[in-house]
Each structure stands twice: as structure tokens, then as C-alpha cells.
Amino acid sequence: MMKSDGTKRETPTLHNQAEKGQIAECVLMPGDPQRARFIAENYLADARLVSEVRGIYAYTGSCRGRKVSVMASGMGAGSMGIYSYELFQFYGVEKIIRVGSAGGLSPHLALRDIVIGTASSTDTGYALQYGLPGTLAPCGDFGLARKAFDYAEKKGLGCRAGMLFSGEAFYYEEEILRKWAQMGALAVEMESAALYMNAAKTHKKALAICTISDLVFSGEKCSVEERQNSFDDMIKMALSIIT
Ligand code: ADE
């Protein structure tokens, strides 16, 4: 990037053109860049676009007087892995809340319910980079999860807290997902495990909250309108726990 005087502007990483200081300590991360734009335009005051490298929008604005950023993660562990690591490690970000969708695995979930990911099991190799002599248990931050759960109770939202299965793939043979459900995974998505591992590695805080957009075993799916309403509850919940 060029500055107005024609000199080159150094940014902390290749994947983000924001300068340090242009990203808030708390960041909401939807998967979809258009969702990031929607959140910035509809839930933040004075939102400014601070990065759009590869179409991954990042905006910074404020909510209830607190500086808040929203940046897309893209899909999957690889993409979430890059952006969340850079936010924690190079931009001084302290808390990331993933606001996404997930496929319901538990028979106790209905479309539009919210799942708070207290733990995230995965079939990705993301933890191999740490060379640990055992199996890491990626966890959501307890303090954030407690605030999210209290918010859901106060608002009377359909909400469960528990294990997510954060998969490498989107298209699984059903029997694989049945095994994860059997082990207690409430819902399947693709980003929380990498996020939680980056938080662990950098000693920061993270939480994934996901609305159930489809029920994997029955094939039921939210309509566009239902998606929008449940999305609204989730974003309000996420903002309430960081502001
Ligand atoms: N996100 C929403 N639904 C999903 C599913 N069924 N699998 C993975 N990620 C999802």
C-alpha cells in the first residue's frame, strides 16, 4: 500500500492491509465477507473499512461506546487459522468471537437455536504444528461462554452450550457425523477449532457462537428469512458479551 506522500506503508502482515491500531481489541468474525459488511453497516457506529485483501473485509467502528472490529474468517481451519492468528499475534487483538452457522447434530437442537462452543473437536491436522505429546482439547473461553449463556437465558433464546465438531470437510458421509453426534458433538462447523488453538497458542480469548442453519440428519434447512432473524439474535449476543 502507498501512503499519500508516495512512500510505501508497512502493514503487519501480507493478508491484512490495516495498520496496527486500526483494529479493535475485540473482533467479531463471521465466515462470509458480505456478513462482515452487513454487521459493520447495521450494528456498528461510524464503521470504516480497514482491510479488503482477497475480499476479506475488515471494518472498525464502535458499539455502546466501545471500539469493535468485524472481520471475515473465510471458510475452514486454514483460512480462520491465518486471519485469527494474525489478529492475535500482530494486531494486539485480545478477544475474537466467531459468529457463524452450523449444522445441528444433536436431536435436542432445532433450526435457529444458538450453540455456544465450549469445546471443539476436530479431524483437522491443525494441532500437529505444536508437536504435543498427546491430544489437545481446543476450548472456548469460559468467561465469554458464561456471559453468552446468561444473555441467552435472559432473552429466552433457544441455546445450548457444549462441544462442536469442527470438520476439515463440508461434505461428509453421514456415518462419520453420526459418530461425532454419538460422542456428544452438538453441531458441525469448520472454523472453531483453529480459532481456539490460536487463542491457546497466543494466550488470548475466543468463543464460537453458531446459529443452527440446517439439521444434518433430517435435511431441514432455514429459510432466508429465518436465517436473518437468528443471525440478529446471535450478533446481539456477541456484542453484548464484549461491550
Ligand atoms: N455450517 C452450516 N451448516 C454446516 C454443515 N452442515 N457443515 C459444516 N458447516 C456448516
Image (spheres, grey):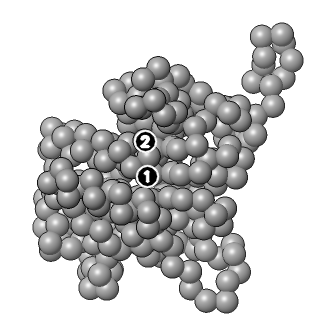
Q: Quadrant of residue 171?
A: bottom left
**How many residues crowd around disc 1 within 10 Å: few (fewer than 14), some, or many (20 or more)?**
many
Q: Is residue 195 left or right of residue 34?
A: right
**Residue at 54% from the left image edge and 59% from the top image edge:** 205
Total marks placed = 2
- Mark 1 lies on residue: 98
The residue drawn where x is 33% and y is 56% is 148
Quarter of the N terminus within the rendering: top right
Residue 46, compared with residue 69, is above or below; it is: above
Q: Is 141 located above or below residue 123 in the figure?
A: above
Label 1 residue near ligand 1, CB within 8 Å: no
Select label 1 or label 2 by which is in front: 2
> Above or below — where is 192 with respect to 125?
above
Disc number placed over residue 173 in the picture, else none: none
Quarter of the picture holding the C terminus: top left
Q: Is residue 237 above or below residue 131?
A: above
Q: Is residue 156 visible?
A: yes
- Amino acid on which the number 1 mark rests in the picture: Arg
- Residue 142: horizontal and vertical position, in percent? 44, 67
